[in-house]
Image (cartoon, coloured by chain):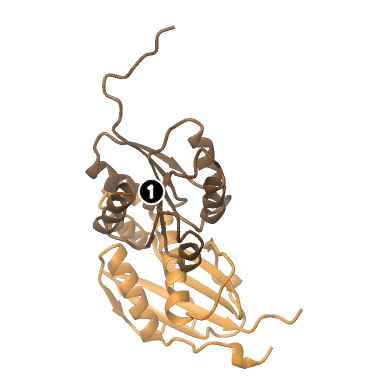
Chain colours: A orange, B brown
Amino acid sequence: MSSSTLPRIPGPAEMADLVSRVIGDWAFLPVQAAGRPAEGPAELGLEFSVRLTGPFQCLMVLRGDYDLAAELAEASTGDPSARDDAKDAFKELVNLLASHLCSVFFPQASFDPFLPLPSTPGSWPDQAPSSASVMMVDRFALELRLWISELPHA
Amino acid sequence: MELEIPAQAPSKTVLLIEDSATVRSFLRRVFLKQWPEANIVEAKDGREALHEMTRCKADLIVTDLQMPGMDGRSFIAKLRSNALLKRKRLLVLSSDDLQDLRDLYVEDMGIRFLKKPSSPDEIMHAIHSLEAV
């Protein structure tokens, strides 16, 4: 497969803008872009990833912490008791972001169905991410990384 | 044997099919605010929803698409291929691109599609338009 099948890769500011719109519409929390993350993973306790397979492959990894997830759970439902479902809220954010990532940045591509799964930095590809962005959601850090690559040859 | 009739039957039964507890909690609050007497039945995937439908008579079904187990697309196909259930009112609420389903069910007046995240007003607007059919 030629490299011409790879899409244009969104930059950190574009990714932060997407996150800002999704979280703003869903949980009504402010998001501030903070550039690129440090080379290695920050100490954040929650990580989920989504693997998109279509005309190319995309691994999306989102990292945050439980306090952020609890804030998202409460803010998106308007229910303080929803903080107990913090992990579930974070997973839903990953689902929302992956879907919006596809429709905003890769509108011509069709991908297989996907589900967010828990992951760790140990499962990341060896190479540096194609794009990465760090944001402050309210007062909590959130890291988003994308690895975009061609499909493996059969 | 006499049938026991509840003093005040719930005004409406809503079946929520969604794997996220957070989203189910949000939707439950939206619907109970609109219909405080409603019976809200929850299922985590399409298979659980089909099971619930043998026990409750859902007036309205709200479903996600991306779910582990039986996903929303398979659930909708099963629902619409069943003579008894094919007229059930259905709101599809998903972050997916919904165009393929819109095209597939273009003549089905009993389905509405909404992209997540949607506000309570957008959700209720879609449901009122379903109920007007």
Q: Nearer the viewer, residue A6 or A70?
A: A6
Three-letter code, disc 1: Arg
Determine the residue positioned at 34% across, 60% down: A67
- Residue furthest front as drawn: B107
User: Vertical placement of A103 versus B102: above or below?
Assistant: below
Determine the residue positioned at 42% across, 72% down: A100
- Residue furthest top as drawn: B1
Image quarter (top left, top right, bottom left or bottom right) of the N terminus of chain A:
bottom right
Give the labeled residue for mark 1. B24
Q: Nearer the viewer, residue A128 or A5?
A: A5
Determine the residue positioned at 40% across, 53% down: B109
Residue A43 visible to the viewer: no
* Left or right, B28 with reference to A149: left
Please provide percent x and percent y for residue A121.
55, 72
Please provide percent x and percent y for residue A131.
48, 85
Q: Secondary structure at mark 1?
A: helix
- Residue furthest right as drawn: A154
* Left or right, A102 with reference to B10: right
